[in-house]
Image (spheres, rainbow, N blue to C red):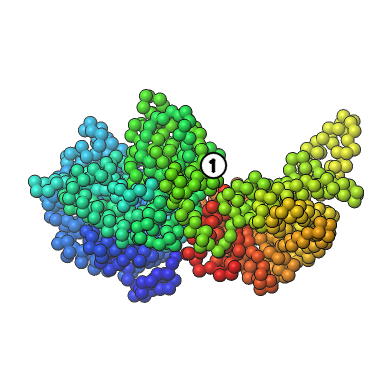
Amino acid sequence: MSENKDPHVGQQGRSVEGVKFVYDFTEGNKDLKDLLGGKGANLAEMTNLGLPVPPGFTITTEACKVYLESGTEPAALRDEVSAHLDALEAAMGKKLGQPDNPLLVSVRSGAKFSMPGMMDTVLNIGLSDKSVQGLAKQAGDDRFAWDSYRRLIQMFGKTVLGVDGELFEDALDAAKAAKKVTVDTELEAADLKKLVTKFKKIVKTEAGRDFPQDPREQMDLAIHAVFDSWNTDRAKLYRRQERIPHDLGTAVNVCSMVFGNLGPTETSRGGGTGVAFTRDPASGHQGVYGDYLENAQGEDVVAGIRNTVPLAELEQIDKKSYDQLMQIMETLENHYKDLCDIEFTIERGQLWMLQTRVGKRTAGAAFRIATQLVDQGLIDEAEALTRVTGAQLAQLMFPRFDEDAKVERVGRGIAASPGAAVGKAVFDSYTAVKWSRSGEKVILVRRETNPDDLDGMIAAEGILTSRGGKTSHAAVVARGMGKTCVCGAEELEVDTKRRRMTVPGGHVVEEGDLISIDGSTGKVYLGEVPVVPSPVVEYFEGRMHPGADDADELVEAVHRMMAFADRKRRLRVRANADNAEDALRARRFGAQGIGLCRTEHMFLGDRRELVERLILADTQDEREESLKALLPLQRKDFVELFEGMDGLPVTVRLLDPPLHEFLPDITELSVRVALAESRQEPHENDLRLLQAVHRLHEQNPMLGLRGVRLGLVIPGLFTMQVRAIAEAVAERRAAKGDPRAEIMIPLVGTVQELEIVREEADKVIAEVEEATGTKLKLAIGTMIELPRAALTAGQIAEAAQFFSFGTNDLTQTVWGFSRDDVEASFFTAYLEKGIFGVSPFETIDRDGVGSLVKLAAEAGRATRPDLKLGVCGEHGGDPESVHFFHEVGLDYVSCSPFRIPVARLEAGRAAVTSKGSDHR
């Protein structure tokens, strides 16, 4: 958590004596998100800007943390809330729950980071059997009053008292069925009054208590429920997914109610509620984007239970409010200098702002908006670079549907979050998770999603709903996760109970049937639609040129951000590539060399037998024969690789397989020998081979005879490879090429190992130089992938000209994990329990593995100031890890070819966002 600047909060963010727990909306600002949460800070900011915000106050995250740790609210909180409530009542001219003219409030969550739908909200606090009568009289609308009361009991019962929400929904459906209507707005006051009685009985039966009639008790219980919602399973799951710290806590916003479901009068029209975006969150294009719902409260829009109308239609419905909203949207975007997401309510012609925040957006929108804001002069290029991420760039590189393919379109909804998703239709989150864990790709199909669907949304390839718009729960959460989503496909009839979906024409999609959804167009297809490369990949491949007449607008935006990132970044980006084809692709993607060429991949297929013979050789002559056969093959491999990377460094790692990978399978060989013996057939060769395999068999091959150990134990193996590299360099030099080879010794644990291998390598290189008359200048270094190597890096640097951190094996050896085993066994449980926020094989473990990398880098450079430092584990392409490697002063990262653009972008972002090392 970033340091809180508020003077009332201690340096460690803990409560201290004299801390202020409650802030009026007039007291805060947008920079107090740590303390007031995002919603509270932005409500305060809008209040300071003079925008129409209903009066209210915010209970701080500090109060929440005290409550969660101690199980009770801070001693001073009740008195502070009372004082602010008194001030609110004085400002509004009425008291909370006053029988003849009640003040009603909402109690809403509001963490520092947006967590849409993950925590709790209760509206209409203050209504009771008495005050509902006063509200009806003041509003001149019985139906509105009883509808507000039933909403309170329903939300309070589910959120605060833990009553199953389906019980209220079933009762509401029954009331509509009895009235023979389809939407709740068609229920009359008498119907709603009966529903209130039914809802109160449900509360009494399920919660074992009456619905509270004391308005202050309602408010206090709702505040505690919001605090508790910080630690619900869905909230914790969302934080893990979005990597939000678990110790932040949530603020609570108590705001005077305004009503979009208050009907018209003779002198004023009715109202509604809506969500607006200052730009399209799906594409980034400027215009009027959002949803509006007449005669509704705010939760109706985001819940997606009623289909909305486009925001542009508000101009015909209520032009005065529409024009005012457009002015406010412009004010907020210019003030925040970013896309803003706005919630508003219109109460009988009066516009009220309920929330604003910097809006979630799709990956494509992020790049477009960043460049648009630069062009408008609102932000500079450095700030624009912080507005896009490597994860978003990776999303843009995913394939898209082939528009020319023969397809069967069965529906079209709202393009809520782009992407091309194909999978089996499933109709509940449990099935989505279950099937996904079995390796199935699934599409979660729902009428609408709610926060309880989060685990299914994470597991699914995409989300399809028949209700809701671009601001529904499904759309907002999917955009935040970068998940493909189509919402509001009304022509699709989703039956979750029968686990099926009926499409126009009567065709039924059963659970398990393949469907495809296009989050860029909103189209829904039967079966699997073929995909084609994205325009962003075509740009990186050089098949689409920015500035050309047919250039994609998105490609132009990506090009500008990439060009700026390349100018700013200090870290160079290399590729992990083992053949010329991968090397050439990596170069097209912007690689500045090869950081890891795994030579063991060159010994597969027909060559595997040669290595097997070398390992099992009994005599020097047998070894020499195998090495002689391998040398020209290796030399040819390196010539092709150096040609593809001409002028750029290529780090070749000498052979580093677990020994068993080049030996016959011991079980198969044993069976073969046994069968031959039983049939009395000749089997001397197999028997000799079996004896050798038994001799070399290892219980834990990953920690056995591999890497430098293999080179030291099997004479001639490493020297053959060094000779092949040296001769390939000489051949390329003779062909006027510019090969820049580097030789990396794997799995070194002590400097003595490196010294022996290096002495032999230097001798071979000198022999090749003399034979070819070419000065080779080959750098020799090592891979730091063992804890001991990191701890003795100062000594190892005496014999190494470069270090390359092998963070995959370093993570295994630091944690004591076998990656292949633990990821399939207990990692899921560790992630679910919060032991890991993210897998340490995905993002660098800063405290453990990262500490060793930092220590080794510093010790190595203390011995050899010009020591080149890089990383070649797959962490080199992970966005968060790239920032760490920048900070500790590495020279380059190396990753798979497809991740090179991501690493380039993040290296640029690291240069403008972190202080980092200035070492070059």
Measured as percent of width and height from the top left, residue 750 is found at 75, 65
Q: In the rendered view, would you say 736 is above or below 199?
A: below
Which quarter of the rendered picture does the C terminus lie within? bottom right
In this image, 23 relative to 811: left or right?
left
Of residues 897 and 417, the one drawn nearer to the viewer in this rendering: 897
Disc 1 marks which amino acid? Arg
Residue under the image location 54 percent in, 42 percent down: 437
Quarter of the rendering containing residue 13 = bottom left
Residue under the image location 56 percent in, 69 percent down: 917
Q: Mark 1 points at which residue?
A: 437
Residue under the image location 17 percent in, 61 percent down: 92
Measured as percent of width and height from the top left, residue 645 is found at 65, 52
Measured as percent of width and height from the top left, residue 360 is found at 38, 52
Q: In the rendered view, would you say 819 is above or below 400?
A: below
Residue under the image location 48 percent in, 59 percent down: 564
Quarter of the rendering containing residue 403 = top left
Measured as percent of width and height from the top left, residue 718 is found at 79, 55
Q: What element carries label 1?
A: helix
